[in-house]
Image (spheres, grey):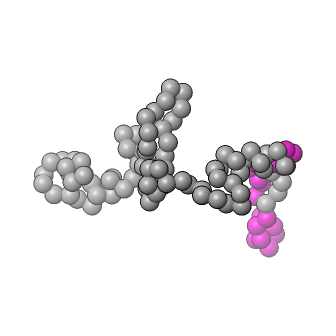
Amino acid sequence: MIRDADQDNDGFISFDEFASLLLPSEARPLQCGKFTGAKKDGESRILRNALLGDDEPLIDNFRGFTSLKEILETNVKSSPSKKFLGTRAKNIGENGAVTFGEY
């Protein structure tokens, strides 16, 4: 890691070189976890929380669910007309109060 940070190969790490280690780049994207398993065609690799073991489940039993997929599928079936993702208009009132509109 130190060799990677010392971009000008002077044997020292400047603040700019240190800071560049912390910022994502094309060669080193921001990653908040660790990749596990082999990459499959047409899929991205599995990114897991760095604090969990490779075989440790993400959800053991949350209200009867054992995966995030189960939670999402159940919510879609029970509320098919509810909005899931989108944007909301930000409205600033005359007094400076901020409210958000419909999705």
The location of residue 21, given as percent across then percent down, is 32, 53
Q: Which residue is at a point 49% across and 46% down the rendered structure image? A: 47
The location of residue 28, given as percent across then percent down, is 37, 44
Seen in the image, is 71 located left or right of residue 93?
A: left
Residue 62, placed above or below residue 55: below
Quick one: 81 or 40, which is closer to the camera? 40
Q: Is residue 86 visible?
A: no
Q: Which residue is at a point 36% across and 56% down the rendered structure image? A: 22
Residue 85, placed above or below residue 98: above
Q: How many marks?
A: 0
Magenta span contains residue 91: yes
> In this picture, which residue range is highlighted in magenta?
79-99
The location of residue 49, given as percent across then percent down, is 48, 55
Prevailing secondary structure of the magenta residues: loop
Q: Which residue is at a point 85% across and 49% down the rendered structure image? A: 79
The single residue placed furthest to the bottom in the displayed view is 95
Residue 65, placed above or below residue 35: below
Q: Which residue is at a point 77% across and 48% down the rendered structure image? A: 74
